[in-house]
Every structure is written in structure tokens, then in C-alpha cells.
Image (cartoon, helix red, strand yellow):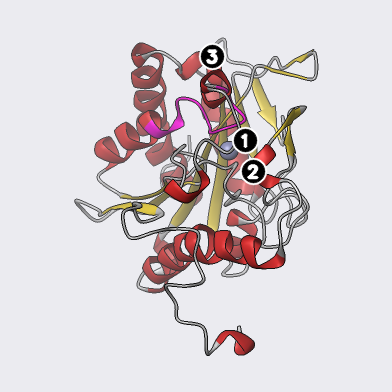
Amino acid sequence: MDDMNNVPADKMTCLTPNDKPPFKFYPAEKESPFFLVSDHAGRMVPAALGNMGLSAAEWERHIAYDIGIREVGEQLREKLGCVLIEQVYSRLVIDCNRAAGHLTSIPPVSDEIIIPANADLSATAKQEREEGVLHPYHREIERHLEARDIDGTIFVSLHSFTPEMKGQKRPWDIGLLHDHDSVSAHILRRLLEQEGTLCIGDNEPYILNAQNEYTVPYHAAKRGLAALEIEIRQDLIQSEEGQREWAERLARLLPLMWKERKGGIAR
Ligand SMILES: [Zn+2]
């Protein structure tokens, strides 16, 4: 940071004036403990990067974004009346759930697809992606968290995962990822089990920790903030019906989870 003092802010970014800001902020409509973030909601690309060397078909795939989660997040936010911050650029531009400089931050390959625009990037080009997308998004989250009552907040990070990875089928309908706060995840798991037929992953299909991920460790673990990371299988939320069903389910169960978490009604 220090050695960049002489660089005008508008120079150190992959965005041009016609590009959209890297996040969308949806304010709370009432007092709510829920603080929703969606790192992989979007698949926009800064104009300067064109199609990044990928075909239209590849832009439809899970490598570009978390299929279905933007719609689930927006509907969930509407039902809960809470804050939502969405990242709008493709994770192929820069993965906002990775620390700057992480091996998979600006992936040269994703699920065996080569990303031509990410090959052999200069340090400056990497920095422009960080300054254009990654840092402003996390600064926005930080700014809103700083204004909140930490005891009365739970940070909920929303994602979706591909049903198949490297030929392996993934059986889970939903995965709850947790590290510093396992209590919230375990309460929600029990509530989801009561739904009957769901296959629920516990730190599946991914393990949440500060090496693999960024958003929850960076914002929630360091503040001692209650947190949940939710992963929904993409084929379940590809249709509008599925998106509505999952938004309704989470809007019903998250308040029950929080009530129990805060020592409300024992069930
Ligand atoms: Zn994701």
C-alpha cells in the first residue's frame, strides 16, 4: 500500500468508468441479526477483459459463478429484511473468497478449463484486479460490519456448488461450512434434518478454514462474530421454483437457528 501513494486511485484498477461498481448493497429494511454476503453471485467482466478468451458456453458453467445463489440470496434478503452485499464480477476475474495473492485468487485454470486472460499475469495486472474488485467489495462489507452490534449479528456467507467435480458425484443437497463458529452450523444442521429428506454436508463439499477461504475467516472469525457458510447444490437452485423453495426454507429456519443460538426457546 505505502509504495502506491503516488498512483492515482483510478489508475490502479481493472475497471473503466463505464464498468459497474464491484458490489451491490441491499440495505436492511428492519432490524435483523442477519448479514448476508454473496461472493460469487455475479459473472460480469470488466470491459477491458472482453470474454477472457472463453466461449459463451463456458460462461454458463459453474466456473464463472455460483449458479442460482444470486436469486436465492436476493429472495432470502427480501424475506428476512436484512442486509445483503453481493459481488457482481465473475470469480474468474478474481475470486473474492480468496486472500489477495492466493494461488487460486485469479485462477489460470478452473475445473480443468484454461482461462486465457489469466495466464502469465504481471504483478500490475493482478493488483488492478485486486484494487478494482476484491478490495472494494471487502471494504464495503467491513464498513457495514463496523457500524453493527457484533453480539446481535450473524454473518451468513452464501454459495452454491456443482453437483459433480472431476467425475465425482456430490450427494449433499446443502453443505454447512464452519470453523470458528460450529455452534450455529450444528443448530442449523439439526433444523435441516427435521425437514426430512435432505442430505446435509458438514464441512462438505469444502472445509472452511483460513487457508482455503477468505470471507468468513477475514470478517467473522477475526471479530468473533457468529457465522455460517451455506453451500447449496446448483441443480437444486437452477430453476425459479428451486430458488424460491430454498429461499423460503432458509428464511424459515435461520431465525429459529438464531433464537436457539442466543439461548431463546430450547427446542
Ligand atoms: Zn462460491
Check disc 3 and report its element: helix, strand or loop. Answer: helix
Residue drawn at x 48%, y 53% is: 155
Identify the image quadrant of residue 214: bottom right
Residue 111 in sight: yes
Q: Which mark is residue 117?
A: 2
Residue drawn at x 33%, y 20% is: 244
Q: Is residue 160 left or right of residue 81?
A: right
Amino acid tagged 2: Ala
Residue 219 in sight: no
Residue drawn at x 80%, y 13% is: 167
Amino acid tagged 1: Leu
Q: Which residue is mark 3?
A: 235
Amino acid tagged 3: Asp
Residue drawn at x 66%, y 54% is: 98
- Out of 260 and 27, give the one closest to the viewer: 27
- In the rendered view of the protein, which quadrant contains the N terminus? bottom right
Beta carbon of the mark 1 residue lies under 8 A of ligand 1: no
Camera-nearest label, 2 or 3:
2
* Magenta residues (range): 61-70
Q: Which mark is residue 176?
A: 1
Report ligand 1 position as a quadrant: top right
Residue 40 in the magenta stretch? The answer is no
Check disc 1 and report its element: helix, strand or loop. Answer: strand
Q: Is residue 256 left or right of residue 210?
A: left
If you read the primary sequence from the N terminus, does the residue marked by circle 1 or circle 3 appear first? 1
Spot occupied by residue 91 in the image (x, y as percentages of width and height): 57, 42
